[in-house]
Amino acid sequence: MGVWNLRCILPALRGAAAALGLALVALSPAHADRGGEPAARQALLQAREAFQKGDVARLAALRPQLDGHLTEPLADYWLLRARLDRASAAEVRAVLARWAGSYWEDRLRNDWLLLLGARGDWNTLLAEAPRFRMNDDPEVRCWVALAQVETGTAAPAAVADTVRQTWLAQRNAGAGCAQAAGRLIAAGVLPAEVAWQRARLGVEAGRLAVATQAVALLNSDWVDLVERAFNAPQRYLDDKVTAVRHRTKEIVTLALIRLATQDPQAAAEEADHLRWRAQLTAEERGWVWGAIGRRAALRLQPQAPQYFARTWEASLPDEWRAWHVRAALRAGDWTAVRRAIALLNPGTQQEPTWTYWLARALQASGQPAEAEQARALLQRIAGVEGFYEQLAAETLGQPLSVPPAPAPPTPAERAAVRALPGLQRALLLIEWGLRTEGVREWHYEVALHSPGGLPDRELLAAAAWACERAIWDRCINTSSRTRQQIDLTQRYPMPLRELVVPRARAIGLDPAYVYGLIRQESRFVTDARSAVGAAGLMQVMPATARWTARKIGLRDFEPHRIDDPELNITIGTAYLKLALDDFEGSMPMAAAAYNAGPGRPRQWRQGPVLEAAVWIENIPFDETRDYVKRVLANTHVYAVLLGQAQPPSARLGRIGPRLATARAPDSELP
């Protein structure tokens, strides 16, 4: 029986006897004789190196060493991917068929679909696209839409909305969506205004390539004008007296948006000139003031609400309008909070963040009917997990308790999951040091292979397997996908408790806070490495580790040992305590400092005294804002699990400028 045929018998395995389950586990790679594994591991690592270098000959020479091995699909993927642009359709389909049902089949099909789109091989593209199970690539989505138009299988108008939404949401200048949009603009079913909107988004985000690609679809001769407006917006505007033609109006709009990213106040003064107020359309002016408001809000400038007040009639991107809400929160204008949330797309309004703040705005009205609406909104999101979900539960007076744990996976459930070659291979790849490949395959198996992912019981069984192997990130992420059966001990494990809890208490830290931070930083992956060099459980930067070691008198500190759990926890908790003390015990500010460095939260705390939730929501960096929320939400759950529950707001407080009587900030804190 082929290994992938095992998936077909999963229903039978789920109901199998425990003895059968034990037999299957005994045959899995976790328990098999691995006498030949060192050679296979060496061959696979060498194959990866050859793939990264594009050395097809070396890959071909290594490939036979992995015949019949669990990692054979990955070897075949690398070998064909390295020469995909030269492979025939028959060759590609042969590999796809050989590993049908696997992550590597779908990964290869994704790559092939992109190549087919770039080549304009519409018939092959349309034949293969329905078999793409992940179906998560926006470029593939656009290529398919274009192929449908070019082959006559769909009218241009039928795919216009899909292309528009996908294109506007893309961050980078992808070829597929741009070509599809250009085709639909030429057909008259996608208005030229969409290209200008795409250009505005690109300019505001600092992505000139996005803007010029979009404008080139309308007229390639205009690209030079866009580049001039982007590179020297004030000079471009100074040279313009009139903006009569539509093209000129749009490029003036781009220049004003670009100026807003450099100096919101200067952009506001320029936008207020009579010539632009008179000559730009209301729609163009709305986008300009939206960009000015967003950039002022990102700088926490008090003028942001008045800039946004000139956009009420404009249809702005949700990302911009969200900053309208944040600026209104910072100003304490609950009426503006309500109005701005109402302008978000309906799906965005349903997110816990905006549901919570809408409820708070309704409560602020003092009207009984609106208080009831607020209560209904809070009840919809309240829960033990999630920053705003926890605040909603506290507002409603719900008890702080752990939901009952589901029944442990049965032997048959465990056996069924452990029989999946994709999960077996993922764990093996992670153990062999190919974490990226292993994590992707694991995620595919639990979330993407079947619509909606694995059902709850199988997710719990897969998470339990990862927990047993101390692969904590897979344990946490897999268990977090369950919808009805919630196991918080899987979602919030506490490995190394004998190190974390005593160390935290010895230096005056809340162990729940330390666990909450580690869970967010590394998911308890001891050898985790970030793109910027942060290392270990607590993701300590090398320079920070050296400084902290000196600060606490740690002799004979060796930077290369920073992955050692005990040393990492010692250094990481010491730094966290120093940051917490520097920010007068504020957990939100200390967490922000841990993520973004202490200088930034020192700057962000200037201005009005705010409740911490408002301050957190106004953190200008998306990553840091999300990080602080997650660390604090994690802390709350860990406190409940450790029997130290207290209301979430007790860890928040209020945040404002440092008091004159407070200790001066530690200027050496890195």
Image (cartoon, helix red, strand yellow):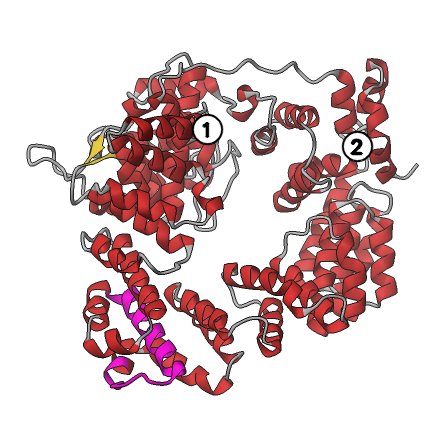
Q: Which mark is residue 34?
A: 2
Q: Is residue 108 left or right of residue 583?
A: right
Vertical placement of residue 479 versus 670, above or below? above
Q: Quadrant of the N terminus?
A: top right
Residue at the (73%, 73%) spot, across then down: 150
Q: Is residue 256 magenta?
A: yes
Residue at the (29%, 59%) spot, across then down: 295
How many neighbours does mark 1 have within 10 angstroms: few (below 14), some (14-19), or many (20 or more)?
A: some
Q: Which mark is residue 380?
A: 1
In this orientation, does residue 601 appear?
A: no
Specify start and end residues of the magenta stretch as a single range: 237-263
Question: In the image, residue 484 lies at what x, y percent?
Answer: 60, 24
Q: Which mark is residue 638?
A: none
Vertical placement of residue 14 versus 356, above or below? above
Question: In the image, residue 467 lies at what x, y percent?
Answer: 61, 25
Vertical placement of residue 164 versus 120, above or below? above
How many neighbours does mark 2 have within 10 angstroms: few (below 14), some (14-19), or many (20 or more)?
A: few
User: Which quadrant of the figure has residue 655?
Assistant: top left
